[in-house]
Amino acid sequence: MGLSICYQLAASGRSEEIGQRMSDWQAQLKRHLPGCNISELAVTDKQVWFDLLPGPGSEIARMRLRNEESELWTGSWDCKTQYAGCAQYGGPANFLEAHGCLIKALDIGYSSGLVETVSDDGGYWSGRSSEKLLERFHAYQSLVASLVAQVRDAGFSATSPQDEPESGRQERSTATIDSF
C-alpha cells in the first residue's frame, strides 16, 4: 500500500534496435537526472533493461523490456515512491524529488516512444500539480498510519515504513540496484 506509479513499456524491433533505443533513453536520463542512481544497461536476445532509484526510501523503478513474440517487446512495472517521504529519508521534500525524478524519467521514455502508458496514484503525471501531489501524499501517509494503528489495536504486531530506522528500507532498496 502506498503511492505508486505504474507504467507500461512497449517497442517493436530487433534486439539490437531495442538495445540501442534503451541505451539512448538511459544516456538521456544520466544527463538530465544526475541525482538518480541508474544501473548499467543489460541486453540479451530476450530482455533489455536498466533500473533506477528515484531517491532514498523509494522502490527501484524497473525499465525493462521483454521479447514476447517476434519483434514485440513489452514490460509492465510499478514503483512506490511514498516512503521516500518518511522523516528518515528527508520527509515530503524528498518524496517530491523522488516522485518527480521518476515522472521525468517516464516523460523522457514517453517522448522516445518506449513508455506506452502511465498511471500515477499521486495524479502528478496528468495534472503536474506539486500541491495536489503533496495533498495526496499526506492523505496516503494518514491512511497507512491509520491502518497500522488498527492492526496494532487488534493485538497484532505491525510496522510501517515510518517506524523503520534510517538503515532499514533504504538498504533494501539500494541493495538490489547494484546486484545484476
Image (cartoon, grey):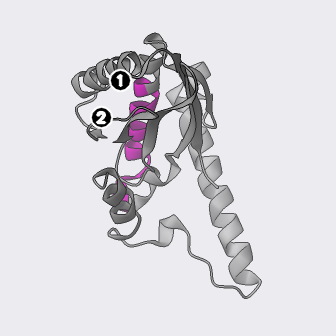
- Look at 56% across and 39% down and name the residue there: 77
Disc 1 marks a residue whose amino acid type is Gly
Q: Nearer the viewer, residue 54 or 95?
A: 54
Quarter of the image for the N terminus: give it.
bottom right
- Look at 43% across and 12% down and name the residue there: 112
Residue 88: x and y in percent read 36, 62
Q: Is residue 132 magenta?
A: no
Query: Label 1, label 2: how many angstroms apart (C-alpha)?
Result: 8 Å
Residue at disc 1, secondary structure: helix
Residue at disc 2, secondary structure: loop
Q: What range of the chain is rendered magenta?
A: 88-105
Q: Nearer the viewer, residue 61 or 16?
A: 16
Residue 120: x and y in percent read 61, 33
Q: Is residue 155 left or right of residue 132?
A: right
Q: Quadrant of residue 73?
A: top right
- Look at 48% across and 72% down and name the residue there: 163
The numbered mark at residue 19 is 1
Disc 2 marks a residue whose amino acid type is Leu
Q: How many labels were placed on the picture? A: 2
Q: Is residue 70 left or right of residue 46?
A: right
- Look at 36% across and 61% down and name the residue there: 170
Q: Are marks 1 and 2 in contact (CB under 8 Å)?
A: yes
Q: Residue at label 2?
A: 41
The numbered mark at residue 159 is none
